Amino acid sequence: MELEPEMEFTSACVIGPGRVGTAVAARLSESMPTRLTDRELETGDADLVLLCVPDRTVHEVAAAIPVGPWIAHTSGARALDALDPHRRRFSLHPLQTIVRHRGPEQLDGAWAAVNGEGDEAIEAAFRLAGLLRLRAFELDDEDRLVYHAGAVMAQGFLVALHRAASELFEQAGAPPDALLPLMHRTMENDFELTGPATRGDWETIERHLKVIRERRPELEPMYRALTDMMTAAVAAR
C-alpha cells in the first residue's frame, strides 16, 4: 500500500526503552529525528508517538499524552481503544522476538500486524512498517487475541519445548547443543513431521512415556499432548 507524500513522518518519540522500544527507536533514528523516553512522557513536537510499553499500561500512558500527533502502540494483544482518547491512532505489532544484545537489524524482514482508525491511519501504519523494514499485513481488532496466542505459541512454546528436550538430553548425558541443528533443519524443511508418530510406532512412544514418567514425570503431560497433536496431523494427511 502506497501513501500520499504528505503522509511522511518527520520526527518520532518512542516511549518505552525496553527491548522493542530500543530496537524501534534505533531504526527510526536512521530516517528521522527520534527521541526515546521512559516515564517522563515528554514527546516534544514529534508527529509520531509510538508506545512500546507493557500491555497493562498502554491506556494509562496514551491518556497522559496530549491529543494531536499520530499515536500508535506495538502491543500484539491490545485493540485500538487502548489509545483513547486519541483518534489519529493505529497499532503495529512486530512479529519478532527481540533481545537486548542485538540491534535494529532484528526487525529486518519480519512481519508486522497493523490496524488503524480509518484508511488514513492504516496507511500511516504501513508507512511506519516500511520505515522499520517490516512486512505489514492488516489485522482486525476482533482477531488480535487469536493472532497473539498463535504468536506466543510459536515463540514461547518453542523455547519451552527446547528446554524440556534439553532436560531429557542432560538426563541421558547427551549435549543439549546437539538439538540445535535438528531444530534448525526441521524449520528449513517447512516443519515436515518425521519420527515414530508418522510411522505408527506406538510401542516406542509408550516406552518414551514410561521412561519420562520415571526420570522427569513433570514432562509427561507435555509429551502426551504434543503426541496427540502429531497423531492428529498424521491422520489428516
Image (cartoon, rainbow, N blue to C red):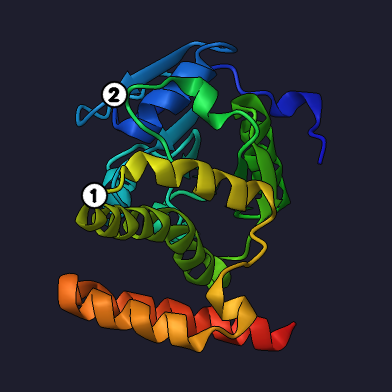
Give above or below for 199 relative to 47.
below
The spot of residue 97 in percent (x, y) is 44, 41
Amino acid type of the residue that numbered disc 1 sits on in the rendered structure: Gly
Residue sitting nearer the eye, 151 or 208: 208
**Is residue 193 in view from this perspective?**
yes
The residue under the point 38% across, 86% down is 206
> What element does badge 1 sit on?
loop
The spot of residue 102 in percent (x, y) is 40, 22
Residue sitting nearer the eye, 153 or 158: 158
Circle 1 crowding by C-alpha within 10 Å: few under 14, some 14–19, many from 20: few
Left or right, residue 211 beside residue 4: left
Chain-order first, disc 1 or disc 2:
2
Amino acid type of the residue that numbered disc 2 sits on in the rendered structure: Thr
> What element does badge 2 sit on?
strand
Circle 2 crowding by C-alpha within 10 Å: few under 14, some 14–19, many from 20: some
Task: Determine the image quadrant of residue 101.
Answer: top left
The residue under the point 25% across, 72% down is 219
Nearer to us of marks 1 and 2 is: 1
Residue of label 1? 173
Residue of label 2? 37
| Image mark count | 2
The residue under the point 44% across, 80% down is 204
Q: CA distance from mark 1 to mark 2?
A: 48 Å
Q: Are marks 1 and 2 in contact (CB under 8 Å)?
A: no
Residue sitting nearer the eye, 78 or 69: 78
The residue under the point 44% across, 53% down is 155
Task: Determine the image quadrant of residue 118.
Answer: bottom right
